[in-house]
Amino acid sequence: KNAIIMSSIPTALLLFSLLCTVHALSLNSLESGVSRRGMIQRGAASAAVASVGFLQRPSIASAATTEKKPKLTNLSNEELAKIITEDVTTRQFLASADLTREIYDESAMFTDEIDTYTLDKWIKGTKQLFVAQKSDVTLTPDTLKVSDSEASFRFSEYLCFNIPFKPVVYLSGTLILKRDTSTGLITSYQEIWDQDVNTVLKSAKFG
């Protein structure tokens, strides 16, 4: 597949700004906050603001409609490690949002380098923002660590955005999942990226 590598940061940000404008206008469910106003009103002149909006998951007001199964409480560290491994490697949940919901507390908050989301909004926003079939998430070998209070691992991923031209960006980082010691459920999700937003955008390829 032929791809154009955006080697110039200003050019990449300009194009992403325009793409963000199209994306913002096409998502009726995207909240009318600072990111959306910036993309529409400022366009290329505020590329930095637009780039953040580009990476931000759409905010969905409605609650998830998927059936909620009983929670898997008080799992052993080994049992939880097995589920997390399958979620990352098989279900590719960082791009697909196909996580095992039963290991998460319903009040869990999801934080990346852009914003913080509720469980329902993270699931719906991720599914709307990325093309899972064209994305790829890798669990860095021998980095998954699970204790009674938290789980963590390193990852790398190529994320294909569900907007015109389907740009793919690369990023890597660490995911920290805090656990409730009384239930064993995950209560917080935090991504710590190795790259800043501009570096992630500079990695974009269009195919």
Image (spheres, rainbow, N blue to C red):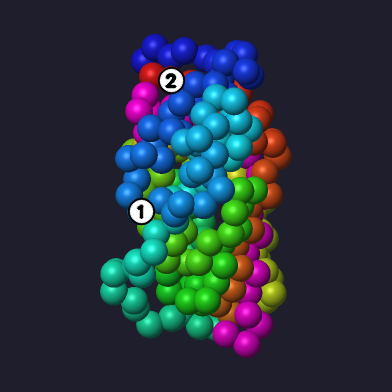
Q: Which amino acid does label 1 sit on?
A: Ser
Residue 190 drawn in magenta: no
The one of 167 and 72 positioned closer to us in this rendering = 167
Q: Mark 2 points at which residue?
A: 206
The one of 86 and 54 positioned closer to us in this rendering = 54
Crowd class of label 1 (few under 14; some 14 to 19; many from 20; radius 10 Å): some
Could you tell me which residue is drawn at 51 percent across and 43 percent down?
37
The one of 150 and 64 positioned closer to us in this rendering = 64
Instruction: Give the image location of residue 87, x and y in percent.
Output: 45, 57
Instruction: Give the image location of residue 165, x and y in percent.
Output: 37, 24
Query: What label sits on residue 45 in the rendered view?
Result: none
Q: Is residue 110 left or right of residue 24?
A: right
Could you tell me which residue is drawn at 64 percent across and 48 percent down?
113
Q: In which quarter of the image is residue 70?
A: bottom left
Instruction: Give the image location of residue 100, x and y in percent.
Output: 42, 66
Q: In which quarter of the image is the C terminus?
A: top left
Between the residue at mark 1 and the residue at mark 2, the CA separation in whole angstroms equals 26 Å
Query: What label sits on residue 29 in the rendered view?
Result: 1
The one of 167 and 61 positioned closer to us in this rendering = 61
Is the residue 107 above or below the residue 11 in the image?
Answer: below
Q: What element carries label 1?
A: loop
Q: State the residue lying farthest toward the bottom.
A: 182
Q: In which quarter of the image is the N terminus?
A: top left
Could you tell me which residue is drawn at 29 percent across and 69 percent down?
66
Q: What residue type is labelled 2?
A: Phe
Q: In this view, does 86 lie to the left or right of 48?
A: left
Q: Is residue 109 left or right of residue 71?
A: right
Instruction: Give the image location of residue 128, x and y in percent.
Output: 36, 48
Residue interval drawn in magenta: 163-183
Q: What element carries label 2?
A: strand
